[in-house]
Image (cartoon, rainbow, N blue to C red):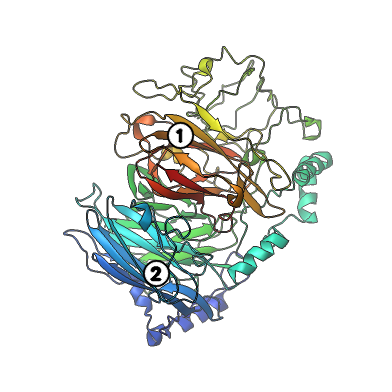
Amino acid sequence: MNTLKTTHTSTKTHSNNVSRRNFIKGAAMSSAMAGVGFNPTQLFASVPGTIEDQPAITASKTLSGTEFYLDINTSIVNFTGTPQIATTVNNMLPSPTLIWREGDEVTLHVTNHLDEMTSIHWHGIILPFEMDGVPGLTYDGIKPGETFTYKFKLQQHGTYWYHSHSGFQEQNGMYGAIVVLPKEKDPYDYQHDHVIQLSDWTDEDPDDVVKNLKRMPDYYNYSQRTLGDFFSEVKAKGFMAAFNERKMWNEMSMMDRDLSDVSGATYTYLMNGANPATHWRGVFKPGEKVRLRFVNSSAMTFFDVNIPGLKMTVIASDGNLVQPVEIDQFRIGVAETYDVLVEPKDDQAYAIFAQAIDRSGYAIGSLTTNAENLAETPEMDPLPILGHSDMAMDMSGMDHSMHGGMNHSMSGMDHSQHQGMKHDMAGIDHSQNQGMKHDMAGMDHSQHQGMKHDKAGMDHSQHQGMKHDMAGMDHSQHQGMQHDMAGMDHSSHKMAQKDANQEVADWPVEQAKIQWGPHTNMQAEDAQYRLSDPGVGLRNNGRKVLTYADLRNLYPTRHDAKPDREIVLNLTGNMERYLWSIDGVPYSKADPIHLKYGERVRITFINNTMMNHPMHLHGLWSDLETGDLNYLPKKHTIVVQPGARISYRVTVDAKGVWAFHCHMLYHMAGMFRKVIVA
């Protein structure tokens, strides 16, 4: 058996920095790679382009053309100082980057050399369902010793990826990037093109990881509160306020530092297969534009990405072109992709820094003019702390006397701290909001620098009796959260979004009764659309952070059909038992979702858990509602934040059987549905 021995190393501590000893150890070990068939220079070597004027695409290994031979095998890897067995394609980790061209028909012969069933799913690629690669749904899988041939015509271009859809093989290394080149030159010019594939690696058997989570859901959480933290809160807030806040979280069986199920306690974070000590490198020339294609191929990790000293211009999301957005940082959920342009002016090395959402580690690489010149590692951001809004807690009826005088009446509210806050709630369905009273009398808006309460077109005539009492509330933590109410028509209790036709929703809404019980101990009482909220740990950090509200399709969508109906799905679970479900029903007990070929459906998710869930619908595009129906961005994976809701529209244009699931690998078994289109 051929082996790929990537003799990388990293620390396995819970500190934010790789130690000097381990960095030197990693550098020394990497010098031996050339002797075992893997040369570090391959990480930044140029690869010939496949169409005229296309910059060379840089990746660990690329294969281009229309016919491919992919061998699934086991290989020896070493990211921690201890050799381990990985599941690989063509003995590569990551698997080879596949370069395709829009309009071509590709043929892929996949041979299984393992002693177990395997598969490959082409994530985000539009194809016949028989080619989608989901065992048990679209085909039987690939048995040991057998070859399965995938064949389909490419109907799109952009940045995508592929991975196993069998067991935990994806966690064990079986994933690779896909770049589909456009038939015609896209509208953005650049001179360098780098794939940046992020992932998480564990030396543990993934089955053992799940067992640990089942036995103790916070098994990998090394950032839990201590007695010292409580004393600090008492000093800052007073004893009763601190005590009641801890009591509230305890009664809900939740922790405000529960950000990732699996952390750097077991994970080593990789960039293009290089750990922090080995350090991936991508080359550029000063003054030239560089395209970076970010792919989050991790099993369980969200990354917050920035390049200190460089602005990034987002030009594509999940393979689809968007109107350019200049940012400093973005959060990339599991299975998402983002393409950005950067234009480094100086002859230096810039750090491409991808912090895990729980700040338990990072992946890093250098964008550099010289492969020998590496960027310094930036400091990690502070540990994020979840707040009430992250769990959509309904504060009505709560005794606020113990909460340091916090009272939720908007009368007399002082917004002097709310610089830049925009109340953006476009797209919200207020059909349930009967009896609502917006008591804002006496509000002092004199200090509302940049704050926008856009309520144009709102009719509150039907909202009798519902009162948002927020007097004296401290909103100092809410900077950057946008609640945009523009275009909402509450008189009909339906969603109204501003577009050329002032569309008003009038479609039927289907919502299953949630099966509450011991398997569902979390509930979002007041889930809201938070499209302009960058998420916990990214609010008010001094950077321009990408949000879903920033994404606008490069091409108009104003003539897209209105939905025929809406399906509301609740994401549910029990962290204590580590059980995940939709509407309180795990996949093993769930009925399929039936869609009619040719219809247009609105999908609304309500996240009743304290975890982010990246929801992936196979075979069909998800047109994300971001507040502007004229330019709905197309995505294949959509993150539903904790305690939030989100909606998107699906044109049902592909018959067959499709998977619909959370892309957190250890959530997928329960948070999964079969979709039948007929």
Cβ–Cβ under 8 Å for marks 2 and 1: no
Q: In this rendering, is residue 395 above or below 232?
A: above
Q: Residue furthest top?
A: 461
Q: Residue 95's mark?
A: 2
Residue in front for this viewpoint, 295 or 476: 295
| Relative horizontal placement of residue 601, taking residue 393 as reference (left or right) | left
Q: Return the disc, 2 or 1, that comes first in the chain's sequence.
A: 2
Residue type at mark 1 is Arg
Residue 596 at what x, y percent from top left? 41, 37
Residue reaching furthest to the bottom: 35
Q: Which mark is residue 271?
A: none
**Residue located at (50% from left, 61% from top):** 298
Name which residue lies at 22% across and 53% down. 103
Residue 346: tell me if it is visible: no
Q: Quadrant of the C terminus?
A: top left
Tell me what residue is drawn at x 20 percent, y 51 percent.
185
Q: Nearer the viewer, residue 396 or 110?
A: 110
- When asked about the image quadrant of residue 444, the answer is top right
Which mark is drawn over residue 602?
1
Q: Amino acid at mark 2?
A: Ser
Give how far across and how far down residue 417 sits, in percent: 60, 32
Disc 2 to disc 1, C-alpha distance: 35 Å
Q: How many marks?
A: 2
Looking at this view, is 1 or 585 the one in front? 585
| SS class, disc 2 | strand
Does residue 663 appear in this view?
A: yes
